[in-house]
Amino acid sequence: MVVTQQEYLEKLCKSYSAYYDISMAEKNAFPLLAELEMHKTETKTAFLGVLTLAEIKTNHYIYVFGTENLTEDVLDSCCEVARKKALKKIKPDSTHMESLVTALFLYNKTENSVLKKAKKKKFTKSFLFSFHGWMRFETKTINLSAI
């Protein structure tokens, strides 16, 4: 049984909905299907919580793309879209530790060369020599025809 992109996306969003803010993409934003965001803040305190020692913010952005045939052109353009969208949302300051950005691709067919390229598609950016945190970009692929 082959799972459709829409069915898989619904299951994915349902399982992530407890922790992530989910916004479905508009129809004209194809191949972008959804954006998932999680923001976490940890506070380190001392003296029974009276004195705040540190505040640490972590973000995770997941951009879900869907296409029938994953090609190098689609991979490159979607990764660039995800990276640009995430960089606009990241607010580096002294409390920002890290932002993880994941481009998730749902596809039915592709070539091995594209999968190898997707695995190598990584990007890291530090903000103010990492004093204001960093951003890490990675890609993940899911072959729906193999499910």
Image: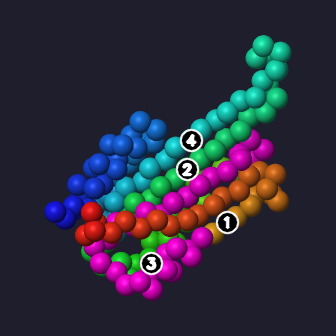
Mark 3 → mark 1, Cα distance in angstroms: 20 Å
Judged from this view, the residue extending furthest toward the left is 1
Coordinates of residue 144 in the picture (x, y in percent): 28, 66
Is residue 102 magenta-colored?
yes
Q: Would you name the residue on which mark 4 appears?
A: 39
Q: Residues within 10 Å of mark 4 (few under 14, many from 20)?
A: few
Nearest to the eye among marks 2 and 3: give it: 3
Q: Residues within 10 Å of mark 2 (few under 14, many from 20)?
A: some
Residue 60 visible:
yes
Vertical order, 56 against 83 (above or below): above
Rendered residue at 30%/54% (across/down): 9
- Is the N terminus in the top left, top right, bottom left or bottom right quadrant? bottom left
Rendered residue at 67%/66% (across/down): 124
Q: Would you name the residue on which mark 2 appears?
A: 60
Q: Would you name the residue on which mark 3 appears?
A: 115
Mark 2 → mark 3, Cα distance in angstroms: 23 Å
Q: Earlier in the sequence, mark 2 or mark 1?
A: 2
Q: Earlier in the sequence, mark 2 or mark 4?
A: 4
Mark 1 → mark 4, Cα distance in angstroms: 19 Å
Amino acid, disc 4: His
Coordinates of residue 15 in the picture (x, y in percent): 36, 43
Vertical order, 107 against 116 (above or below): above
Please state the extent of the stretch shown in magenta in the rendering.
Answer: 93-122
Mark 2 → mark 1, Cα distance in angstroms: 14 Å
- Is the C terminus in the top left, top right, bottom left or bottom right quadrant? bottom left
Amino acid, disc 1: Thr
